[in-house]
Amino acid sequence: MTNRMTRPGMLVGTPVLRVNDPKLLTGKGQFVDDLRLPGMVHATILRSPVAHARIVAVDAGEAELDPNVLAVITPEAAVRDTKTLPCVFVMPGQRMTAYPVATADVVRYVGQPLGVVVARSRAAAEDAAETVRIDFAELPAVVDPEIAVLDGAPLLYPDWGTNVAIDMDGGDPPEQVEQAIAAAAHVIAMRFRIQRQSGQPMEPRGVVARWDAATRELTMWSSTQVPHHVRDGLADALGLPYDRVRVIAPDVGGGFGPKDHLYPDEVLVCLAAMRTGRPVKWIEDRREHFTATVQAREQIHEARLALDGDGRFLALHTRMLADLGAHPSNVGAGPAFVTTGLLQGPYRIPVSGSHMTCVVTNKTPVGAYRGFGMQQAAWVRERLVDEAARRLGSTPHEIRRRNMLRRDELPYTTRTNQRYDSGDYIAALDRAVTLVTPSTPPPDDGRRRGIGLSSYVEFTGLGPTAVQQSRNFRLGGYETARVRLEPDGTATLLTGVCPHGQGLETSLAQLVADQLGLPIEDVKVVFGDTATAPYSSAGTIASRSMAVGGGATVRAAGKVRQKLLQIAANALEASPDDLELTDRTVRVRGTPKSAITIRSLAEQAWLGWGLPPGVAPGLEEQDIYDPEDISYSYATHAAAIAVDVKTGQIEVERYIVVHDCGVIVNPMIVDGQIHGGVAQGLGGALLEEVVYDPTGQPLTTTYMDYLIPTSAEVPDMVVEHSEIPSPFIPGGMKGMGEGGTIAPPAALGNALANAMPEIAHLVTTTPLSLSTVWSWIARGSRTSTERA
Amino acid sequence: MSVTINGTRHVVEVEVRTLLSDLLRQELGYTGTHVGCEHGVCGACTVLVDGQAVRSCLMLAPQVDGREILTVESLSGPSGLHPLQDSFRRHHGLQCGFCTPGILMGVLGEANAGRDLQTVLDSVLSGHLCRCTGYVNIRAAIRDAWPTLKERR
Amino acid sequence: MKPAPFAYRDPHSLDEALALLDQHGDEAVVLAGGQSLVPLLNLRLSRPAMIVDVNRIPGLDGITVDDGGVEIGCLARASAVEWHQELFRRLPVMAAALHHVGHPQIRNRTTIGGNLAHADPASELPAVMAALDGEIRLTSPTGVRRLRWDEFFIGPFSTARQPQELVTSAWLPLTGGLCATFQEVARRHGDFAVVGACVACREQDGVVAEARIALCGVSGTPLRVRAAERAITGRPVDADSLAQLGEAVRGALDPPADIHASAEYRREVGATIVSRALAALWEGRAAGH
């Protein structure tokens, strides 16, 4: 099934080893905490220890007298010297479209940044911070989103008169949905809860800030996915001109979404650098990360799938309650909106709609995390589909086959206006079923075994700017690439995207190398510094870097190629159409002796000597590429699990991914992205949950409490691809960074329901932790005893 | 205090509360050792102290006075990458690379202690958190390099 | 976060260490393996005025095995105990239990003395001490005290050790014919036990002549379940006796709930793993163990 699109002599489609690995493997990476600037001092952030309170008094007198301390920025000073950060994803009617960097009156979540202490060492800063006395008058906290929507609940923003920040319908109108459901032969109605999670890159956030008072220029090194976006926000928050603020992302130790914007505490660190005149370093520690960095996922759904007597889907609807935390973050309700937008999945559903309510609570704000709402959509939809199969006497495979869009039905526009571009969803489903079906009977070890499927369509390559504008997602959806063929014949790609582990330093270089007939080692990818990289409004988020950044790269390198061929054609007295570009050489096809090296052409171009008429000197081209539409990747995952019914422990015995992200540039990297995505999905399925007590105190602030998967929890997996190209991205690629994360919870939930049909109706919440699964089994066996 | 790091002896004055990880990174510039949690779970800061793999965030600097420490910077030389590093590269056993130095040192420490491959894959590797790779290619890299590691012991 | 300031001493002899503890009393904290203490320091949850690092004291890491029992010095690392050949031959349950303590990189530092003195209710080793009737030896300037495990563990993170005392060794009797095993359920490999059990039994004439059952993770201290021991003693291990064993364990447990598991879970699964452990021991006996 895997039909790799490789061409002889070309790097696209081949597993080129990553160019930046040697540096990382030898400990020579430069992460933000590795930077040491002369005179550098260290910051710690003052944070709220309570979930909801009024600040009554602040006394920093002792800290200010501490000889190790260079500055204390109190809440009042922070408010005075900073402005707001923008919500870039703004829903119709959304209350609050920007949030302040600082607060001196009311705190709304544990961990909210209030001020900064700068000292000669981090330890000294922490010593002094302990002496800063902040008196709070506590207010009642609201933690549970279902309580937050009730009349009489404590209000985070009393002037709103409610905790509801956004309330809206999506898809088909409610009357139409209700009509379709009322007329259906079968309605599967279930209530789902998806837990709160945390992205947890292994490198926490961190900043080094340097202020040059003479030139009034601010330089910030930040562990971020989006240096330009951070630059813009930082300049606005501090009232500086954009051209005097430079943001550099050095090596970044994972992002996964949470590093997709500028945080209030990062602004405060920059303010501290301006205040002290010294370079200031702040590295988020892991405990801070658990309250100060955006969290994700938490949603409750009341969802219905309506079917006719033959098991054909007639209608789908969910009433969703999403928890935003203490304020809409940069992306605010974006993930919840994407949940409703992608709820329909790969199926033909004539009527589909949603009602979405987003509430604020006294918890850390939620933001972007790998999967961005699509994991929740898959959980709700795929569990409903399996329950429908069970109740109608069909099978999970058969019911999916009957309702899945066929290849010849694409392009297809869903009820939420997603225009699925290309693919063969059923082929992926069938192949996954084949691969997961055991060839030998399982051992009889007393455990129950089951197989679960999970199919999805993934929104990637954000995005056409027009689509973003139509949804009021205030980021440009284009990407810029600048390709320069240097005078010695090597190439430099300057790109606006900003890799942080994905390997774009290699895969984008493959695209350039193929266009220009160069080996991989002749191409250098430059990114991550607002002073040198082309402007990128969105950065490396939303599985867009290869689709949009790659598209721009192909086009920019293609322009250089055309110019190179034009110059070569002139020199070789041949038509450009008869030339080929390989091995650092331009040759006349069929006349191997008639050749000229790229180096000599490049030298000539940069000297500007002897160029054909009308050809300008130089070999540097830029392309700003705004794709024509969203590209949609898709997959079916299949999991085979064993359940210990006495302990609730689930072991994943086999895991299958059959996937299509269009043309694969580097199969090694693509498989690695899928493995990692699946691992995070398994974490969400089995282990990870951010827990708060009823007063809003977080109970999961270390790796002893918040459990992310280790090697023991992630099995080896089978990953296969088809490569149906994107119809419009130059190069045919689609995005794929998030896909692996979307499907695993539903695959495991469905496998559990398959292993133990007697508890299938209870399998509605994640994580499928051993205590939860065990309690379902206990309830399920009690129920069946009662029934008997 | 004095400490030998990757064969070089350093004499340094530090606060007694300095963690070994900070001694290496902040005081002496061995920034290849990374700090991911500072409470002994993630394993990113793993180094060898007198040959044994330990979490450097869970030792105090004065505890290594007079001892020998090996960090990731010790592995490669003029002849190129260490076989385990090379295998990680060939099998795509790293993505962001933040956890990688700790994993390399943890695996090598336990391999040098005579542990078998299965123990390393089952127990040692699960003492390191990696959020990028899903561990699949890390296991492949360790398996592939194992015969060479055994020979080099 | 970084530790709050403290004074640090690393005595080179036991006498010197004991003098320091005697002088500083409650103000001083003993640093052994540091795998529990240093995280607490880093999180500033523990802020002692003085740390007495005992790692440079020679002679405290011995492991001696004779016919009467096993003595393990307080500074013996968990990995050294786990891979000690003679100990493994005579008391394989130690390796089985220690295998669950963190990961190898942690066990290279974890010490037996530190693990016991920390008295984490979810910790495995105290349950082994309880099942095997182990003894903790404490040394002070005035001499050596020997406390039975149930005299030593008095509550969660709380022991009968006086501030001027150092846990210097653990002693476990070797009882002829007694086979022991350790089972636990944790959310991931290497995590603290949600519930764990050390179960030992001696078989004679086709019945359980003696049983020892101790659990961790279910109460403030390791818990010996003597009612369950009585329930199985004198009986062969079969479905019927295992059911009664489980019932006895269930009846004896009043475990706590936390974010990892409910109280009911710990009670029921505690009973399950005790039954499984005993069944496994019985099968191992049949296989000529």
Image (spheres, helix red, strand yellow):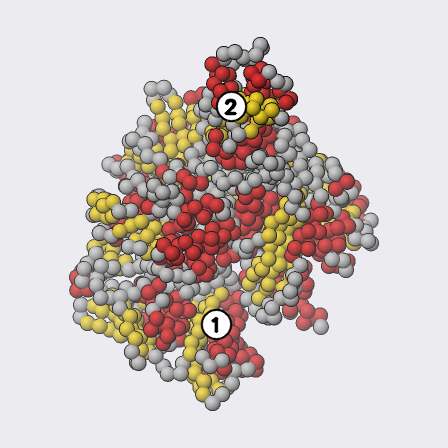
| Residue at (36% x, 31% y) in the render | A272
Above or below: residue C36 compared with residue A780: above
Q: Does residue A408 appear left or right of residue C18 in this picture?
A: right
Q: Which of labels 1 and 2 is toward the front? A: 2
Q: Distance between the residues labelled 1 and 2?
A: 81 Å
Residue C155 at least partly seen: no
x then y, percent, for residue C42? 34, 50
Q: Which residue is drawn at 44% across and 33% down?
A: A249
For mark 2, give the secondary structure: strand
Q: Mark 2 lies on which chain?
A: A
Q: In this view, does A462 lie to the left or right of B93?
A: right
Q: Which residue is farthest top?
A: A613
Q: Position of residue A217 (x, y in %)?
A: 39, 22
The residue type indicated by label 2 comes to: Thr
Q: Residue A597 carries which label?
A: 2
Quarter occupied by residue A190: bottom right
State whether residue C60 appears in this view: yes
- Name the spot of residue C207 as percent of width and height, x first: 48, 87
Question: In this picture, is C212 found above or below B35?
Answer: below
Q: In this view, does C255 lie above or below A562?
A: below
Identify the residue position indicated by label 1 in the image: C253
Percent of width and height locating residue A565: 58, 20
Q: Which of A268 and A157 is in front in this view?
A: A268
The relative height of residue B80 versus residue A527 in the rendered view (above or below) is below
Task: Chain letter for mark 1, please.
Answer: C
**In the rendering, which numbered label is found on residue A543?**
none
Inspect the image, locate mark 1, and give the three-letter code of the amino acid beneath it: Leu
